[in-house]
Amino acid sequence: MLDLTTLGDDAIATKGWYKSHKHLILRRFSQLGILALFLAGPWFGIWIVKGSLASSLTLDVLPLTDPYVLLQAGLSGVVPETAAIIGVIIVLAFYFLVGGRVYCSWVCPVNMVTDLAAWLRRKLGIRTTSQISRSTRYWMLALTLILPLVAAGGIVWELVNPVSMMFRGIVFGMGAAWLMIAGIFLFDLLVAKHGWCGHICPVGAFYSLVGSKSLLKVNAVRRQACNDCMACYLVCPEPQVIKPALMGEKQGLGPVILSSDCTNCGRCIDICAKEVFSYGGRHAIKIDECKGEGEINRGARV
């Protein structure tokens, strides 16, 4: 069995430290940069972006609205303004192109907390078996859409949404938000691997539906080079999405990770010493083994 304490050492030795952490670093810049844009106003009086992740206005021109929040508001009886509708269209178009769950890995600040818990689990060798189904998040999503219909016009989920609580806490002082964030951290650390994002969070479930036909995908483009080290499975927050693309050649499956549960986080790309994975489109990329791994032929659509 792979030693979790040395996970990634092969990639570092082969590609160097930066290339083995490239997408992780870029994700942190993205998450912290987005937070910084929102905080520049209330903290320093520089109003580049006004609002929150739920609804914002950039440079007093560009509206962006979380479609999940607006959907809940609509179900609760709120009539959206034109700017909110335009903001939703822009957001939906973006996530349709790059994949809905890019929100989870490149935007959501809670991801930094859950990633820390996952890293610490590996370093401490914590192994727990959770019986929570990954479909639970879709039941949670359904519940959050039913509650506004019966809660007298209230968007109930936003009262306990960790993303909203963390954002409000950073701006106005954490308060009770610390308890929620600490609870998620401990849950992921001690109870279930990738428990919150991978099994419970309805936000991720919503965005997986939004990006189900997205154009940007991770491809196991050089799957013939795979040495079965299992490193990609161990770092992936949704490891079940990897096998069809990586091991499905005998079943006639292409090397594209088509599952909408994939967060496009790029950790499989970073951690693989053989550079099996890369970003690409929804079209299969096949390596002609007769010509060697250096020549890549673009194949038929998956």
Image (tube, grey):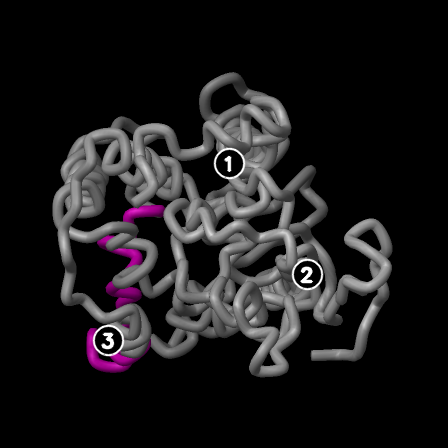
The three-letter amino acid code for the residue at tag 3 is: Leu
Q: Residue at x 40, y 65 (%)?
A: 240
Residue 147 circle label: 3
Residue 45 circle label: none
Q: Can residue 168 be seen in this view?
A: no
Magenta stretch contains residue 254: no
Q: Which of marks 1 and 2 is nearer the N terminus?
A: 1
Q: In this view, does 179 lie to the left or right of 264?
A: left
Q: Is residue 187 left or right of residue 99?
A: left
Q: Which residue is drawn at 46% across and 28% down?
A: 9
Q: Is mark 1 on a helix, strand or loop?
A: helix
Give the foreground label among 1 and 2.
Answer: 2
Q: What element carries label 2?
A: loop
The three-letter amino acid code for the residue at tag 2 is: Leu
In-front residue for pair 173/112: 112
Q: What stretch is highlighted in magenta?
A: 143-163
Furthest residue toward top: 44
Q: Where 92 sits versus 104, above or below? A: below
In this figure, which residue is indicated by the disc labeled 1? 31
In-front residue for pair 120/89: 120
- Residue 141, percent from left and from top: 32, 72
Q: Earlier in the sequence, mark 3 or mark 2?
A: 3
Residue 216 circle label: 2
Give the foreground label among 3 and 2.
Answer: 2
Q: Is residue 64 left or right of residue 55?
A: right
